[in-house]
Structures are given as C-alpha cells and as structure tokens.
C-alpha cells in the first residue's frame, strides 16, 4: 500500500474511525485530485462519520449542509439579516440620506448571513470539509444548483456580485439512494460505496467507539449483527446501531449476550415495527446461539 | 511504463467495461488515469480500488468491474502491458468516442437525445391509443420513452407553481425589504410568495394476477416512470398476497426492472385475493405510508371471488386515511363497462375516481389528478 494511503488509514484510526483500504484510497484520491467524494451505502454505515473524521484528520472545520426536500438557496447559501437591515435603513432615513445611499448601506457583507455553502467557500483559514448530507433528499433543482457551485466554487449574490472561494473545500456528499443522483453530479465526484463492515472491522469499530465493551461482548455483538444482516429486513441495521447497542448493553452491565437481554434491547438495533414483529423469541435464540457458538469454537 | 501507454491501456479497459454494460464516460477515463498517477502501480489491489473509485463504478456494477479488472490487468505477469492481448482487444473494440455515442442511444433510455429512433408523431399517436392487451413487448421500449415524457408533465406542472404570488402566501422578506428601501425602511406592503406545492405522496397498489396479465407490464412501466417525478412513491403488488416492491424498483431499464419484479413477486399472474390484500395493506403498511396528503392509486380489474365485505372494510379504512383514492381499471376503457364485479362494486363507494387504464392516453389523463 502507498505510504500516503497507509498514513490516512492510520490517521483515521487514531481519530477513532476504523477505515479500510478502499476508504483510505478514496479519501487519498479525493484529496489529491481535489474532487468531491460521493459516499453511498445503507443508512448507518458511517458515511456522515467519515466526513467528520476527515475534518479532524485535515484539522479543519466541518461545514455541514443537511439536505431535505424543499431545501432552497436561502437556507443553503445565504440570507439577508432583515431586522438589522431594517434598523439600519430606519436610522439612515432619520439622518435624511437618499434612498440610493441607504440601499448601498444595507446590502453589504455585514448584513449577510452565511449559510453552509457560502461559509465553506469563504472560510479564510484554509479549506473546510464541506459535508452535503443526504443529497438524495434534496430535489433535482437543488442538485443542479449544487452542480454549479461545485464546479466553479463561486456564487453570485445579486446585490453584492460574485464571491469566489478563498480555498476550495474538501467536499463530501452522502446519499442513501432514496433516489438516483443525477449523472452530471455523479461524474463530477469520486465514488465510494460503504458496505457494511466485515466482522473483524465491525468488532474493532465497536471496541474503539465503546471502549468499555469487552472483547467477548464486542465479538458477540459483531457476529449477531452479521447474522442479522443476512435476514430479509426492511431496515437493515448498520454499524451505528451496533455502537448504540453496545452502549446500551454496557449500561445494563452485560458482558455477553443472552436471549433475554437481546429481546429486551432489540429496539436498539431494529427500528422498524415489522422487523421487530418478525423476529420472534426462537429466532433471537438462534441468532444468540450463532453469536456465541462461534465464540466457543 | 510511460504515461502514454497507461492512457491507452485505460482507454481499452474502459472499452471493455462499456462492452459489458458499465457506463464509463471520457471524464471517468481521465479521472482513472489521474488516479493511476497517484497510486502504487505495483500494488494490484490498490490500482483496483483506485480505478473503481475514480471511474465511479456503482455498487451494482462491482461484480462486472471486478471480473473485467481481473482479466484485463491481472491476466499474467506484473505489468499491465504484458497482460493485454492488444491486438485482440483493440480489434474487438472501436475507439473510445465511437463507443460512447453508441452507448448513449441504445443505453438506458433516459439519454433522450436519440432523435433517430424516436417514434414519429403519427406513430406516437397510434401507440398512445393502442390497447395494452394488444401491445407487444417491443412496444414497451417506445412506450417507456413516451411515458417518461408524460410523467415529466407532472414535474413541470409543479415547478411552475414556485413563482411568488401577489395575493396569498407567506411573506417574502427579501423582496419586501427591497421595496421598503424607497420608503425609508417602512414596510408599506409585504411581498409574498406561495409555498411550492408539496410533492404528491403516491402509493400504488398493483394487481398482478392472471386476469391483469396483459396490462400489468404497461401499468408498471407507467408507475416506474412516475417514480422519476414522484420520488417518494411506494409500490405494492398483490395477487394472492401483498408484497412491498419499492426496494426492487431501481431506476434504469424498465424491462429489466419488470423482470426483476416478476421474479421477486411470488405467484405472479396467479389468482387474486383483493380483499385480503387490501386488508393486509391497511393493517401492515397504511400507518407508515398513507397520510393526509397521500394519493392511493389502485391498479386492478376488480375481478375477485373473495368476500366483498372484506374489500369494503379495507377501502373504508383507506378512505379515512388518504386524501384521494384513484382506481385504474383496464376494463373501464370499454364504454359498455359497468363496475358490477363484486369486489369492484364493494370498493366503488370509497373510490374518488374510477378511471380507465387500457392505453396510454387514458393514463395521460390521470396524471393531473395525482398532484
């Protein structure tokens, strides 16, 4: 492995993010090629966590834009500070200034409220990590706008003119694939699909994120989750759920899994009523046995 | 190896990928080449990961990619150059640009630029009125394009409503303040803008029983196209039992999706139990997927030998939750049709609209009602 990629792998691990070679390679390429990194994968697979870890790794600020349906430019880019503008306009009026001058006054940088995208490109100290989270939730119109921002790293505000990026940010986009991301946007990015971790990696993640969890507990949780993901579920739990669960079990002072405890805490990993209903006591027993059987072997 | 060699090899490799159905553009090749200059070329795994990331190979294409990579780069020896039977591959594949143009037209259908094979106006009109039960599988492809255009109408209808309004709507502070400048910060009148109409929440329940066979493929093709516009649409199929198929509906080729569906749905084109299926939907799924904004679209001929009271009960419960229930019935295309089949008759009081769905034109008419 290239030393630079190994360095990223080690660096992320020191920060508590247990990556693997594909992740480290993608991060390395995204950094060197200065391209946005599009992360796809199931929910709970650690996409958002990776962006946070990157900000820590590059020792910079994480600017996060959470996407949702109906997200518009004024929430993503900038908004004017209306109360301040209004006050200033009033004062200026009292001073008897002409309208044109008032307008000049109140449409200045200091009356501008920076939203994430503007914040990310105007950061002076160095490139930020810009996380555009769940981009699949925003509508296609917004995606087109995003495309424009990500290709030029400049935005135009009618009253102010064009603002160019001081430092081009590292961009991470995540998608849960609730819809297909447009080809144009996809082509502009590098692509990484985050799969559910292997058993070995999952156990390491649990142990790193929940330091109190012993080897036995983490191992059993890992094997239980691996087996559980093999089932047909409407919401397959990710690593995030494994971590939650480990924390919950720790609070309950458990150092291993047993059918009763699992049944009581199943809500930590299954967040869907139908999935919960379908996993009866017998199946829980079988999964626990599988998790422990391998331990004994 | 020189940079030039590498680029040539990569172009060949991209050609192999394209030949196997993985869409790779010139930009992806460029990114791939750049990635290769950054990684350790002696480390095959690293080259593999780098190319996969830089050429943006989607998860679903990974297997194909891995196989192609294995054959192309790792055939024998250390150097990729040694592995490439240049003559054979170069002979089998036209140069990059040509191939891309070809992929664009025969590709997944939403390229849209394939003017040459777009049906002419009259052919399109014919297709529009061609009853589904007389359509051949070959019509499906042409129909798919047509339906996609129909569905786009839904999208443009919505976006036109985003314009700021004069009368009602929420205050538009940005414009209000602009106006207030001339009155010294005094807001004489508030500018307003209307909230955009929310995307339709569409829930489709499609009958895939034997009696619907001739129509199902086309109706589902319609549903698939609708999903490009109404992205949150949920789709269920039912015959003797109910199944949620939304997870099976990946964007892309409609025909392939339909095959995947047919394979994934047990008892496809078997008998029907409408009442049981609707009841199951109400108890199991309606709580999650049907709300006050939902439009429920039922695609069924209403032919069923079960207990009609079960249908009525389920429909009543559905009616209480949903904004609108539209029942698309292929049989209703016939002017002589009367909804007298027992299940249909039982459902009718709770249906906001019973509409025919025997050809494209009838589907086109239903689109505005889905908003």
Image (cartoon, coloured by chain):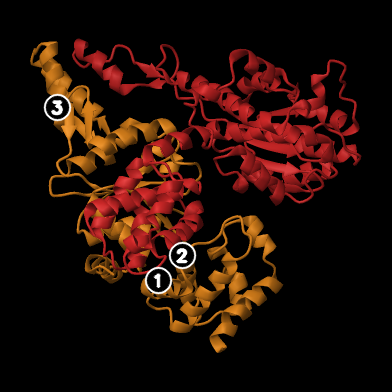
Chain colours: A orange, B red
Disc 2 packing (10 Å; few <14; some 14–19; many ≥20): many
Q: Secondary structure at mark 1?
A: helix
| Residue on which the image places disc 1 | A205
User: Could you say where residue B59 lies in the image, as x and y percent from the top left?
Assistant: 48, 54
Q: Quadrant of residue B163?
A: top left
Give the image location of residue B244, x and y in percent: 67, 47
Query: Marks 1 and 3, how far apart in space?
Result: 48 Å
Q: Camera-side residue: B256 or B8?
A: B8
Q: Chain of mark 2?
A: A
Residue at 65 percent across and 29 percent down: it is B323
Tell me: A297 left or right of B243. Answer: left
The residue tagged with tag 3: helix, strand or loop? loop
Dot 3: chain letter: A
Residue A17, visible in the rendered structure: no
Distance between the alpha carbons at the discs numbered 2 and 3: 46 Å
Q: Can residue B368 be seen in the rendering of this structure?
A: yes
Q: Depth-wise, is mark 2 or mark 3 nearer the camera?
A: 2
Task: Judge whether B289 appears above or below B223 on screen.
Answer: below
Q: Dividing the image into 4 quarters, which one contains the C terminus of chain B?
A: top right
Please state which of residues B202 and B47 is positioned toward the viewer in this rendering. Answer: B47
Chain letter for the residue marked with disc 1 in the picture: A
- Residue beneath the point at 27% across and 37% down: A151
**B75 displayed left or right of A188:** right
Q: Which residue is mark 2?
A: A239
Label 1–label 2 contact, CB within 8 A: yes
Image quarter in which the N terminus of chain B is found = bottom left
Q: How many marks?
A: 3
Q: Which residue is mark 3?
A: A108
């Amino acid at each position: 492995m290239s030393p630079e990629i190994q360095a990223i792998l080690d660096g992320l691990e020191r920060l508590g993010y247990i990556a693997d070679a594909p992740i480290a390679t993608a991060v390395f390429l995204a950094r060197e090629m200065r391209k946005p990194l599009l992360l796809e994968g199931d929910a709970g697979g650690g996409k958002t966590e990776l962006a946070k870890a990157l900000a820590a790794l590059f020792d910079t600020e994480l600017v996060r834009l959470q996407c949702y349906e109906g997200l518009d430019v004024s929430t993503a880019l900038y908004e004017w500070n209306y109360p301040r503008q209004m006050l200033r306009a009033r004062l200026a009026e009292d001073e008897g200034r002409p309208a044109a001058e008032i307008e000049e006054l109140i449409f200045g940088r200091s009356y501008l409220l920076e939203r994430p995208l503007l914040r990310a490109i105007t950061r002076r100290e160095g490139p930020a990590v810009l996380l555009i989270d769940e981009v699949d939730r925003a509508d296609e119109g917004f995606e087109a706008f995003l495309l424009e921002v990500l290709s030029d790293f400049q935005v135009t505000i009618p009253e102010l003119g064009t603002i160019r990026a001081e430092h081009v940010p590292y961009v991470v986009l995540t998608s849960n694939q609730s819809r297909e991301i447009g080809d144009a946007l996809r082509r502009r990015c590098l692509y990484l699909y985050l799969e559910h971790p292997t058993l070995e990696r999952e156990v390491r993640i649990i142990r790193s994120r929940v330091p109190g969890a012993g080897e036995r507990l983490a191992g059993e949780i890992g094997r239980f989750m691996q087996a559980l993901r093999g089932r047909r579920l409407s919401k397959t739990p990710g690593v995030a759920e494994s971590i939650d669960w480990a924390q919950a079990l720790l609070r309950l002072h458990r150092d291993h899994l047993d059918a009763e405890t699992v049944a009581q805490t199943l809500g930590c990993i299954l967040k869907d009523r139908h999935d919960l209903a379908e996993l009866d006591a017998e199946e829980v027993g079988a999964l626990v046995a599988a998790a422990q059987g391998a331990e004994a072997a | 190896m020189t940079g030039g060699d590498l680029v040539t090899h990569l172009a060949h490799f991209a050609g192999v990928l394209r030949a196997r159905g993985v869409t790779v553009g010139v930009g992806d090749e460029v990114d791939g080449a750049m990635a290769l200059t950054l990684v350790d070329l002696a480390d095959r795994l690293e080259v593999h990961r780098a190319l996969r990331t830089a050429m943006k190979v989607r998860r679903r294409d990974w297997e194909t990619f891995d196989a192609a990579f294995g054959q192309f780069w790792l055939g024998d020896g250390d150097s990729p150059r040694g592995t490439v039977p240049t003559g054979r591959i170069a002979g089998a594949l036209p140069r990059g640009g040509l191939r891309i143009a070809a992929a664009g037209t025969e590709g997944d259908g939403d390229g849209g630029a394939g003017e040459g094979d777009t049906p002419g106006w009259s052919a399109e009109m014919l297709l529009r009125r061609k009853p589904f039960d007389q359509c051949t599988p070959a019509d499906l492809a042409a129909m798919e394009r047509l339906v996609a255009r129909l569905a786009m109408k839904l999208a443009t209808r919505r976006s036109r409503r985003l314009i700021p309004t004069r009368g009602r709507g929420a205050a538009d502070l940005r414009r209000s303040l602009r106006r207030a400048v001339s009155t010294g910060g005094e807001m004489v009148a508030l500018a307003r803008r209307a909230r955009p109409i929310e995307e339709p929440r569409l829930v489709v329940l499609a009958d895939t029983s034997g009696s619907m066979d001739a129509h199902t493929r086309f109706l589902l093709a319609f549903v698939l196209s609708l999903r490009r516009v109404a992205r949150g649409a949920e789709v269920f199929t039912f015959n003797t039992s109910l199944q949620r198929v939304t997870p099976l509906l990946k964007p892309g080729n409609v025909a392939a999706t339909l095959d995947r569906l047919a394979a994934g749905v047990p008892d496809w084109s078997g008998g029907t139990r409408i009442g049981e299926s609707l009841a199951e939907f109400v108890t199991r799924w309606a709580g999650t997927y049907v709300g006050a904004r939902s439009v429920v679209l039922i695609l069924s001929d209403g032919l069923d030998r079960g207990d009609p009271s079960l249908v009525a009960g389920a429909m009543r419960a559905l009616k209480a939750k949903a904004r609108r229930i539209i029942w698309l019935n292929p049989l209703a295309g016939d002017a002589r049709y009367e909804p007298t089949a027992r299940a249909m008759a039982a459902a009718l009081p709770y249906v906001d609209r019973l509409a025919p769905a025997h050809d494209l034109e009838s589907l086109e008419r239903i689109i505005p009602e889905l908003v």
